[in-house]
């Protein structure tokens, strides 16, 4: 009987060394259709996992859900399953006024406002992407989406705003490009566990704190192209990263 990784229900040693991760299970299934020889590994809760090949290279696609806590379960489980490099493909809210909807951001690092990693390692430990993963995505973006930007993002434990102020306006003034909910968790876990990681996100509008959720237009046509482009960049990059 196969030994199964808790919660995400994947067998140990069943995961490809190269993994594309995203929040939405439906998006993971969509990305898997870009692969050949696709096999459903598991569908458990928000964690849907598929194996296949991209241009002959084994790749796993897996969803991690929304938020750092659930995502940490996914990332840890994928590493136990055999992952050696994980690239997160997702969406974000922008923190910079000059960044249009549909812009792509390749993250070099993430501010650790996730609410999870301080319980894992002191906050002085940085959340950084692997430089060769960043370089591979930058190279792929030159042909696929040359306007993609590279820089620091922030990972927040919040999605909707609460009664207390956040660090987002301060980070905006400091040049942080965008806010999302999982990247710093991935970067910290990957660094501590000795694997490589990266993240590319598509901007679907300003951060809620700046505009309010009721003014948010979530699925315009321009986002569809941005998501397709970031998936392509991630796939083209991950097969070139050494593991």
Image (tube, rainbow, N blue to C red):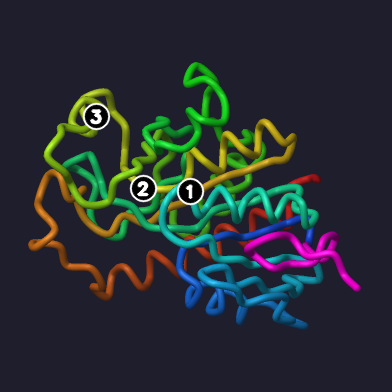
Q: Are marks 2 and 1 in contact (CB under 8 Å)?
A: no
Predominant SS of the magenta segment: loop
- Measure how far apart labels 2 and 1 are at the Cα level: 14 Å
Whether residue 5 is in magenta: the answer is: yes
Please report whichever mark, 2 or 3, sits nearer to the chain's N-terminal start.
Answer: 3
Magenta part of the protein: which range? 1-15
Residue tagged 3: 167
Q: Position of residue 40 (x, y in %)?
A: 70, 81
Label 2: few (<14), some (14–19) or many (≥20) C-alpha neighbours in 10 Å: many
**Image quadrant in which the C terminus is located:** top right
Answer with left or right where residue 179 lies relative to residue 114.
left
Q: Position of residue 110 (x, y in %)?
A: 44, 34
**Image quadrant in which the N terminus is located:** bottom right
Residue tagged 2: 180
Whether residue 3 is in magenta: the answer is: yes
Where 122 sits versus 102, above or below? above
Rendered residue at 55%/59% (across/down): 233
Rendered residue at 17%/67% (across/down): 217
Q: Position of residue 68 (x, y in %)?
A: 46, 47
User: Which numbered marker is on residue 69?
Assistant: 1
């Amino acid at each position: 009987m196969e030994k199964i990784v808790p919660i995400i229900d994947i067998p140990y040693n069943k995961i490809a060394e190269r993994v594309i991760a995203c929040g939405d299970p439906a998006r993971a299934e969509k990305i898997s259709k870009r692969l050949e020889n696709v096999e459903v590994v598991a569908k458990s809760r928000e964690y849907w996992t598929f194996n296949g090949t991209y241009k002959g290279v084994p790749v796993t696609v897996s969803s991690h859900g929304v938020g750092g806590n659930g995502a940490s379960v996914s990332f840890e489980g994928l590493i136990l399953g055999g992952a050696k490099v994980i690239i997160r493909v997702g969406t974000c809210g922008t923190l910079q006024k000059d960044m249009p909807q549909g812009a792509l951001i390749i993250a070099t690092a993430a501010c650790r406002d996730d609410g999870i990693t301080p319980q894992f390692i002191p906050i002085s430990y940085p959340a950084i992407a692997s430089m060769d993963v960043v370089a591979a995505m930058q190279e792929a973006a030159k042909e696929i989406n040359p306007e993609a930007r590279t820089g620091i993002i922030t990972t927040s434990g919040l999605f909707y705003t609460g009664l207390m102020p956040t660090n987002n306006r301060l980070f905006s003034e400091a040049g942080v490009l965008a806010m999302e909910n999982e990247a710093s968790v991935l970067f910290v876990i990957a660094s501590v566990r000795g694997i490589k990681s990266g993240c590319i996100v598509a901007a679907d509008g300003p951060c809620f704190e700046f505009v309010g959720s009721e003014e948010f237009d979530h699925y315009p046509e321009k986002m569809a192209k941005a998501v397709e482009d970031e998936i392509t960049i991630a796939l083209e990059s991950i097969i070139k990263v050494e593991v």
